[in-house]
Each structure stands twice: as C-alpha cells, then as structure tokens.
Image: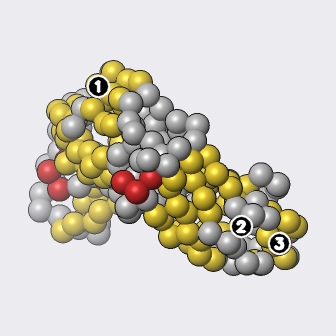
Amino acid sequence: MRAHRALWVPLLTAACSGGPLPPATIGSVTPMVMIASQPTQVEVQVDVVLSTQVDYAGGTILVQSGLEVHVGPEELGSGTYPPGGLVQGTLATVLALGTYDVVADLEDGRRAVRHDVFTVVPGTWPSGYTVDPVGDQRSGVPFSVTLRATGTNGPTFEGNVLLGTSSGGEVSPAVSSAFASGVCTQTVTLTGAGQRVLTVTDIAGNSGQSAPFTVSP
C-alpha cells in the first residue's frame, strides 16, 4: 500500500460525533467490460465520509484522504481520494480474460468491494513483435527502444505489452506504453551486466525479442 497522505485545511469547527464512520461504498464502475487488447479508461465512484482528526492547539483538521482502488490486480487512480470521489485511470492491456472484483481501500482501514463487476473479453492481437536494433548500454542508464507489432493486426495495434530479459537482470518498466498504429518507442532501464536480449510478450502469448546486445556495469 502506498504511503499515507494527509490534507491539512483550516479549522472551521471543533464538533465531532466520535462515533464510527459509515462504511465506504463503490457506487458505479464505468465501463464494466474491457476488450483485452485495448487500453481502457475506467471510472470508479467511491462514496465515503473521510476520517478526520482535529488538532485543537494548531487550529487544523487532518483529513485521511489516502485511497487505493484496484480492478483485479491493477491499481487505478492517484492514491488519494479525489474531489467527488470519482477515481479515474487507464487500464493497460495486461489483464487476463475473466471477471474481476473492484476494491477500494481507505487509509483508515475501511474497505469497499464490488464482486465480479468488471469483465475482460477477448481482443485482437498482433501475431508477434520485433525490436529495432539496440546498441550497447550501461546498467541503470535509461535508453530508448522501438517495438513494432507484426502480422495482419500489427498496424492497428494500440495495446500494451510486457517487457523482460531472457538472460538475467531486470528491465523497467515491466509494462510498455501503449502502441500507436502498431509502434511503441519506449524508454527502458536494464540492471546487471552482460549480454542481454530484450523480450516482448502480450497476454495472448504472442512474443518477440531483440538481437543480443551488451550491458556494461
């Protein structure tokens, strides 16, 4: 869970009930269906009375505004309760086919869940991927790579892919930016030293890789 966030506002009143806060609820999820190969803008309405702590000496109110929303394993939003409670974000094309819960976790420990409310349905994928030639690199130093979707559906692909290496070390980010007309130019960082191959895979099992290149310490 992300670090707690706090919002300080001028003290308007010292009144408080001291009783338990009402449970948080998820009012809506829009849309409720995602095509697996298409990044999708999702909105989740979270309705909650935020927990507050009054600092009488300082004349301030501490509002516990930390909020994490997940669609299945994927996080949505900024990690802070937005004005009006409408959490927005774009889901990358890394969710397997199936139905997922939407979960909202408040900083104060309250949780809201809507079970089996978001569904990922089959999409249209390229037949594979290529990686433009990569020169020698240094560990921990960002560099740019260009990924290309191939096959009949390649020129129209606008999804995301998983990045990795087949020969040790780690690559960051692990998920690419969205393709545009079948092409993605992405800044990545590799750790570790030695000969490396950058791998590209989508959740449908289509893949590709770069030619070997050397990463120095």
- Reading the image, the residue beneath label 3 is 214
Q: CA distance from mark 1 to mark 2?
A: 37 Å
Residue type marked 1: Val
The kind of secondary structure element at disc 2 is strand
Q: How is the image coloured?
A: secondary structure
Camera-nearest label, 2 or 3: 3
The residue under label 1 is 117
**Residue ID at (43%, 28%):** 97
Q: Amino acid at mark 3?
A: Thr
Residue 106 in percent (x, y) is at 35, 42
Q: Nearer the viewer, residue 3 or 122?
A: 122
Work out how far the residue at label 1 is from the one at label 3, CA to CA, in angstroms. Answer: 46 Å
Q: Position of residue 161 (x, y in %)?
A: 52, 51
Residue pictured at 56% horizontal, 48% vertical: 128
Say whether disc 1 or disc 3 marks the residue closer to the N-terminus.
1
Residue drawn at (28%, 66%) of the image: 8
- State the residue in front, 146 or 98: 146
